[in-house]
Image (tube, helix red, strand yellow):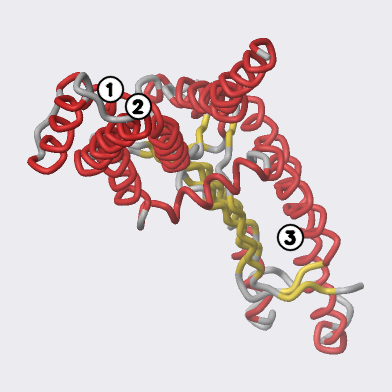
Amino acid sequence: MAELIFPIEKEFTGPFFISIEHLEKLDEIISKYVVIFNEYTEKQIVALREKYIKENVNKFKGSIPSPNDSSIDKYIYQMEDLKSKNEVEVSVRFHSKKSLIGKNFRDILTDPATKDEIPDEISINIVNGDIDIAIKLDRHSRGKIEIDKNFRTPLPLFQEFQYEIINWIEKVKVNKLITYWCNIGRILPIFGLPLITFMIIWGMNLLNNNDSINEAYKGALKNRIIKIVENGITKDNEPKAIEYILALNTGYQYKDIYKECSQNYKAKNSNSYLYMIILALILQIILYYPRTAIEIGRGKQRLKAWNIWIKFVTYGFPTLIVLPILLNIFSSFLVK
């Protein structure tokens, strides 16, 4: 039979959305394999004792030694000691830094102390003979399975256990699209907030750029002068032409012309400003990426809130952006 060399460590990236049903299923898996591990440890001890007696059959002359016999190998005593190590501990760590420990998650789910708590992390520790297993999922979207220490055990035993635990973790993980969102969101704070601030300030400056509006105003005056010249200078339009030339050279502003230029400039650049705002919102949404949620205590509201937020971001927000664009295109066809 093949053997698996330990320690084993496998990591996962979340976030993880863990419902009550998921916790109950995890309890079932743990209970099932604790029984299997117990049987394995028992067989291991029996096999070692039989092997020792067989190797020393002449010494014992066919008789089975008492467990108290000092001649029995120390390793067998060690295995007897390992047999007594049969512990299953599940724990939930809350945002308040408090923790609850139990034999299974059902005990913790029914504990009144969880009512006002927000869970951040769950962990499972299984010690059975020379088997030492640790499983942990935290709010920072990290998950880990550790099968420790330096021992050998039948490969199929841990292949089956790993398969069931990994399958359970895959079910509580969000889909790949949300995982990518979270991965980007973790990196973005390094430059995201300064970028958002810059974009909003730049957009506001774009709409209220006096230099650009002044240039547009000068251009409007020049166009009026050119139009007068093209139509021919007469006694009627000569004073107006002189006024425009003087205004152009002195910087005088006709309120009505300047207001019109300002409105035209803002209307022309409003789409650019809108795109900057949309991009800033997208960056802000990316920064507010989902975290692990566990349906214990107030974690139920957190899980519900994250699910609503994800639906809004993946369906609602794109609709709010695309729908006005489609309506604008549709209305342009109607006008034609």
Give the numbered dot on residue 41.
3
Considering only order in the chain, which callout, 1 or 3, is on the residue closer to the N terminus?
3
- Is the residue under label 1 in contact with that under label 2 (CB below 8 Å)? yes
Q: Amino acid at mark 3?
A: Thr
Question: How far apart, in angstroms, are the residues tagged by discs 3 and 2?
Answer: 83 Å
Q: Residue at x 52, y 21 (%)?
A: 304
Nearest to the eye among marks 3 and 1: give it. 1
User: Which x, y percent locates residue 223?
Assistant: 32, 35
Between 100 and 72, the residue placed more toward the observer is 100
Q: Is residue 102 left or right of residue 179?
A: left
**Quarter of the figure that contains the C terminus:** top right
Q: Residue at x 75, y 41 (%)?
A: 32
Spot the residue most to the front: 235
Give the quadrant of residue 82.
bottom right
User: Which x, y percent locates residue 216?
Assistant: 29, 37
Task: Give the residue number, with chain letter if any, for mark 2.
Answer: 264
